[in-house]
Amino acid sequence: MIAQLYPLLLGAYGPQGWWPLTSMAGRRGFDSRGYHPGGFSFPLAPGQRFEIAVGAVLTQNTSWGNAEKALAALFSASEVRAPRDLLACSVERLAGLVRSSGYHNQKARTLRVLSEFFQAPANLRASSPPARDELLSLRGIGEETADSILLYAFSQPVFVVDAYTRRLLQRIGAIGGRESYREIQALFHDALPQEHELFNEYHALIVAHAKARCRAQPACEGCPVLRCRARLLPHHPARRPPQTHTRSRT
């Protein structure tokens, strides 16, 4: 079912070009907002990886549009391109710059913690991905943010589970609604090849579908998933929670 859902979404919405790199907007291979559909070689440099990590924090509990405004404010006002630039800003100034993303005081503190992590000698060039547990040990970094950093900044094959994913899977009867983050993530890890390009595109497509159709008040008429629901779930009873998976992934 997880595997069959992906081509339906891809056919409906096309390649999404995640994670957008605001600093590359308008350059060759990027659109005016920094998306790069079909290009999975990015990020190429430590600065781009750090930009994605900052964006992953800023988009917590808000839309990407609000996070994008905060990134633009950081770039224009502080010339933030590296951890040292952000660490040179006070928490108060950072909070003011990222106000558009919401929870700005909390996010300012988290950004400083994240910058210290990336500034550490072992992570300065970010040549290798950090361990998931390392990211989760940082104040303000939860599972969704940690996995976003691993997948989009370091091309690690970990699936990102967000509120949109939960909503979609519950509405098509794939989950009951009380499953843990890791249980839902395991559905994707078990059903799909362990390829970061696939996980990258799939998560982005779920977000696109949630915004276009599977909103809090759903727009079901013409929905590509609704039309194929019977085929996707021929023998899968609704609201049946999956078995708990205990394997560890970093």
Image (cartoon, rainbow, N blue to C red):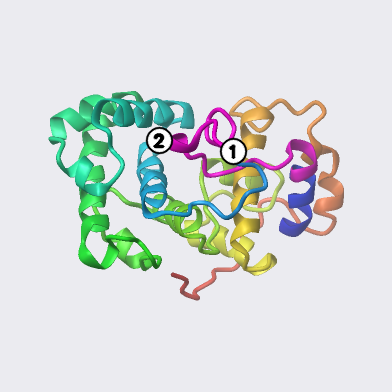
Residue positioned 36% across, 37% down in the render: 58
Query: What is the CA distance from the residue labelled 1 to the residue labelled 2?
Result: 31 Å
> Which quarter of the rendered picture does the C terminus lie within?
bottom left
| Badge 1: residue crowd in 10 Å (few <14, some 14–19, many ≥20) | few
Q: Among all residues in the image, which is located at the extreme bottom?
A: 247
Inspect the image, locate mark 1, and give the three-letter code of the amino acid beneath it: Arg
Q: Which disc, if any, is residue 28?
A: 1
Residue 175 percent location from the top left of the image: 63, 53
Left or right of 222 on screen, residue 159: left
The span shown in magenta is 10-35
Q: Mark 2 falls on what kind of element?
A: loop
Q: Is residue 85 above or below residue 66?
A: below
Q: Nearer the viewer, residue 47 or 212?
A: 47
Q: Is residue 235 above or below residue 6?
A: below
Q: Among all residues in the image, which is located at the extreme front?
A: 28
Tell me which corner region of the image, top left, top right, bottom left or bottom right, holds residue 2. bottom right
Residue positioned 66% across, 51% down in the render: 239
Q: Mark 1 falls on what kind of element?
A: loop
| Residue 54 appears in the figure | yes
Inspect the image, locate mark 2, and give the three-letter code of the amino acid beneath it: Asn
Q: Which disc, if any, is residue 61?
A: 2
Tell me which corner region of the image, top left, top right, bottom left or bottom right, holds residue 128. bottom left
Residue 94 inside the magenta-drawn segment: no
